[in-house]
Amino acid sequence: MKKNMGNTDKIIRLIIAAIIGVLHYTGLIPGTLGLVLLVLAAVFAITSFINFCPLYLPFGLNTCSIKDKE
């Protein structure tokens, strides 16, 4: 897998995942919506850690700068 996520993209995804986790934990997003958002947050966190987003491939997106690819 080639990297296709830049540092800014990873940071934004991790921040969103953390916010969703905190909102669910505090009960502000309960029920089915909360579980769906937790799954989305988990996907955001996993893709951030592996530096690869499969949804970018069909669209030809790449937020990784040249120096990040090394």
Image (spheres, rainbow, N blue to C red):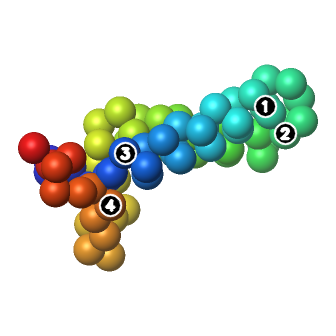
Q: Nearer the viewer, mark 1 or mark 4?
A: 4
Most distant residue in the bottom direction: 59
Circle 1 is placed at which residue position?
24
Label 1 CA crowd tier, 10 Å (few <14, some 14–19, many 20+): some
In the displayed structure, does residue 65 sit left or right of residue 31?
left
Q: Residue at the far right: name it.
A: 28
Q: Is residue 31 visible?
A: no
Residue at 16% over, 49% down: 67
Question: Where does residue 30 sit, x and y in percent of width and height?
Answer: 86, 36
Judged by depth in the image, the label closer to the viewer, 3 or 1, is 3
The amino acid at mark 3 is Asn
Residue 15 spot, x, y in % from top left: 60, 38
Name the outermost residue toward the top.
25
**Label 3: how many Cα within 10 Å (few below 14, some 14–19, many 20+):** some
Numbered circle sitting on residue 7: 3
Q: Can you identify the residue that label 2 sits on?
A: 29
